[in-house]
Amino acid sequence: MTAAFTAGALLLTCRVRPAVLIVIVVRSAIAPIGWNAVLRATHANQFFTDAPITIIPASWQDAGSGVVTFAAVAAVLGAGPQRREPAQRVVALAALAGLVAFIVDVYLY
């Protein structure tokens, strides 16, 4: 689900090449799954407790999904299809993917 929302956000807000879009979408699908696998393997149940804030009931797990997605997308783009682009562009694309992953985790899972 994160991948679909990330693709939609990218198509609505940015002009990216198809190769870049594919890399971001694939990474934004894999990164939260990997993060959740780590949390489950380490029995880190405390990470799944939502904050007592009505507007944005985020947990550490939700924040981790956003951070891990940001890092994974930035690393792959920086080493791959965006390596010749300015870092600002790579970071902006990775930040968008991380933000979408965070929002999807908070409100849809």
Image (cartoon, grey):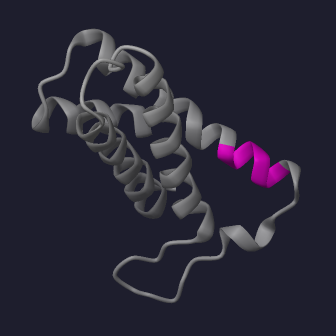
Magenta residues?
Answer: 35-40
Kindly give the residue lying farthest to the right in the view shown: 42
Q: Position of residue 52 (x, y in %)?
A: 51, 89
Q: Position of residue 101 (x, y in %)?
A: 43, 48
User: From the viewer's perspective, is residue 87 above or below residue 20?
Assistant: below
User: From the viewer's perspective, is residue 43 above or below residue 46?
Assistant: above
Residue 91 or residue 24, whichever sits in front: 91
Kindly give the residue lying farthest to the top in the view shown: 19
At x 57%, y 37%, the residue is: 31
Q: Is residue 101 left or right of residue 35?
A: left
The kind of secondary structure the magenta stretch mainly shows is helix
Rendered image quadrant of residue 88: top left
User: From the viewer's perspective, is residue 38 above or below residue 53?
Assistant: above
Residue 58 or residue 109, whichever sits in front: 58
Q: Is residue 8 left or right of residue 90?
A: left
Q: Is residue 67 left or right of residue 82?
A: right
Q: How many marks?
A: 0
Residue 28 or residue 70, whichever sits in front: 70
Rendered image quadrant of residue 107: bottom left
At x 44%, y 87%, the residue is: 53
Q: Is residue 36 left or right of residue 107?
A: right
